Image (cartoon, helix red, strand yellow):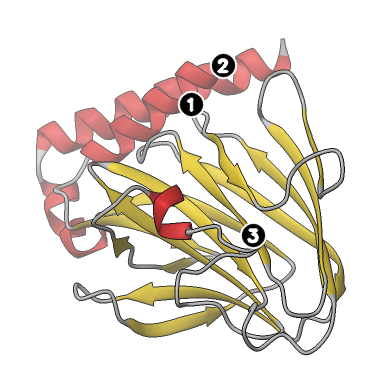
Amino acid sequence: MRLLKYIAFVVLSLSGSFAQAGFIASGNQVSTLSLKQDAVSFYDYTNGSANTGFEESNSLLFFITEFAGSHHLVGLFDSPVESQDMGGVDLLMEDKSFNLGGFDFIDDQGPNGDYFWQNTLGTLSVFKSGWAKGYSDGFVYNIGGTLGTDITLKLSKLRGINAISFLNFDGQGNIISRESLDTTFDIKYIVDTNSNRDQLVSTPSHLFSFGLALLVLTLVRRNAKN
């Protein structure tokens, strides 16, 4: 089933010329942060908190990093420097991607730290985070691949949090914008073919590819019914 969905996604993507490709969060295209070190080293867990330089008080921040061809979703909860009170959040993550990812690091995970649970398939994770005044929390999640990325995050029981944002970066590593997020949002990877719609309609090879994609989707639906 998952293989058929992946094939359908790839064929649909290839049915038009590649105009633009990238990650989207909650329906908005986002830009990644290019790193010069791996994502866990960048997180720089020191003195019980993250030290990336992007932490913000009373905020939940999310963004995607890229290093050596690998992409990671990073979550930063509050700021160890500016934190004025304790805080917390419960996070449920569902990974429906073709290539499943996994947590490379969870801040304060352990018997005396934050609660973490994951099913045996690795598709569903629960992370209950809490931090004291003067500390922060967060995680580093390894996205298994780009094509076929389909991750949903659900946040609940927010304490000491005033804002939830997804950060966008320029090529120099500066924040250029931020998208406000609801407590439930998804992250996907798409190929945008809208700017080549005329070519898609007029070129026979594109029509063939599109027809093949529809055939695969039909097989997916029949499998689902069975």
Q: Residue at x 62, y 16 (%)?
A: 222
Q: Quadrant of the C terminus?
A: top right
Q: Quadrant of the N terminus?
A: top right
Q: Quadrant of residue 147?
A: top left
Q: Secondary structure at mark 2?
A: loop
Dot 3 or dot 2: first in sequence order is: 2
Which residue type does callout 2 highlight? Met
In this rendered view, identify the residue nearer to me: 156 or 128: 128
Residue indicated by mark 2: 1
Which residue type does callout 1 highlight? Lys
**Whole-percent x and y of residue 76?**
59, 67
Q: On screen, 196 above or below 164? A: above
Which residue type does callout 3 highlight? Gly
- Dot 3 alpha-carbon crowd within 10 angstroms: few under 14, some 14 to 19, many 20 or more: many
In front: label 3 or label 2: 3
* Left or right: 220 as drawn, with respect to 24: right
Q: Secondary structure at mark 3?
A: strand
* Left or right: 154 as drawn, with respect to 70: right
Residue indicated by mark 1: 5
Residue indicated by mark 3: 138
In this rendered view, identify the residue nearer to me: 101 or 222: 101
- Dot 1 alpha-carbon crowd within 10 angstroms: few under 14, some 14 to 19, many 20 or more: some
Residue sticking out furthest to the top: 226
* Left or right: 72 as drawn, with respect to 203: right
Whether the residues at callouts 1 and 2 have beta carbons within 8 Å, the answer is yes
Q: On screen, 184 above or below 176? A: above
